[in-house]
Image (cartoon, rainbow, N blue to C red):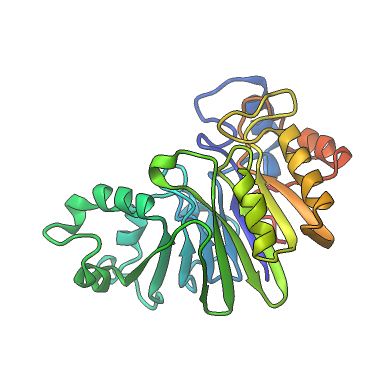
Amino acid sequence: MELTFLGTGAANAFPEAFCRCENCERARVLGGPSLRKRSAALIDDELLIDLGPDIMTASNLHGRPLTRVRYCLQTHAHADHMDPSHFLSRSPGYGVVGAPRLHFYASRGTLQVAARLLERDCAPLSFFDPEMGEQLNLEIHTIEAFQSFDFGRYRVTAFPANHDPEVECLLYAVEAEGRCIFYGADTAALPEAVWQGFHQAGLRFDVVILDHTYGPEELGTDHLSARQVIAHAARMREERLLADGARVLATHIAHEGNPAHPELAVWAAKHGYEVAYDGLLV
């Protein structure tokens, strides 16, 4: 599998366009890996994780066309992770030629939010109406936490995130060709049921991607902090959830408390993990 980070920033990106804090100002000066769009990822050019607000820009900037995307795993419905206007803009009605049918996997709570946001655009049909699916070149799949399912050459297991239960946020383990990726953003500390679920599913990860909203000197609350990333990685090693040579990478990085990329990358390396950046190919 090949995974490209299309975005590695938290909800307000990095630098925050309206902010003059030290971290944002330094990121502007440095550019490059210090410039972070809202979080999303692409696997093998055909599997998208999060239909986010910045994926169009990311696709063009990093040379990763989304023309072959046929599957999307949606973590949740918050605006920095899901922009339902993409359902319209990728449809034949907007002049799109040759796009494969999109299979969209999400929790019931997330799909209900999408339906409300698209109510006016889909009227008089519902977002869930099969006829609307034909117009949007879309097939919707409702999934639940701890459910495993297959599509194409992938096997996916969904896990509950510790984040806004109202929209039923999900994290994903993606398996293919003897490899396994865990994509863990957005979430606070992983619930014990998730740790048990890893073992019950017999998972060992080659790549672990964890939320890193808060920096080295901050406490994790509704998201993970740098030191919680260290603790989560240590527990994964102790419980033999990491394959030999596994990589642990941080994403969903906020400007509050996290320095620009070079400084943060050096700090992370000293503590046994890596910091992802926009356009990074793993």
Name the spot of residue 219 as percent of width and height, x first: 67, 25
Name the spot of residue 125 as percent of width and height, x first: 15, 62
Name the spot of residue 5 as percent of width and height, x first: 63, 55
From this view, report whether residue 187 is shown above or below residue 41.
Answer: above
Decide which of 33, 238 is in the foreground and name it.
238
Residue 231 left/right relative to 50: right
From this view, report whether residue 83 is shown above or below residue 212.
Answer: below
Question: In which image quadrant can residue 89 be found?
Answer: bottom left
* Count of picture labels: 0
Name the spot of residue 211 as percent of width and height, x first: 63, 42
Q: Is residue 199 visible?
A: yes
Residue 137 left/right relative to 100: left
Decide which of 132, 225 is in the foreground and name it.
225
From this view, report whether residue 208 is shown above or below residue 217.
Answer: below
In the image, what residue occupies the spot 61% across and 71% down? 44
The N terminus, quarter of image: bottom right
Residue 200 left/right relative to 93: right
Residue 30 left/right relative to 107: right
Q: Residue furthest top?
A: 21
Q: Residue furthest right?
A: 270
The C terminus, quarter of image: bottom right
Decide which of 161, 121 is in the foreground and name it.
161
From this view, report whether residue 262 is shown above or below residue 276.
Answer: above
Q: Is residue 79 visible?
A: no
Q: Residue furthest left?
A: 124
Question: In which image quadrant can residue 108 be found?
Answer: bottom left
In the image, what residue occupies the spot 73% across and 49% down? 249
Question: In which image quadrant can residue 131 be found?
Answer: bottom left
Decide which of 59, 136 is in the foreground and name it.
136
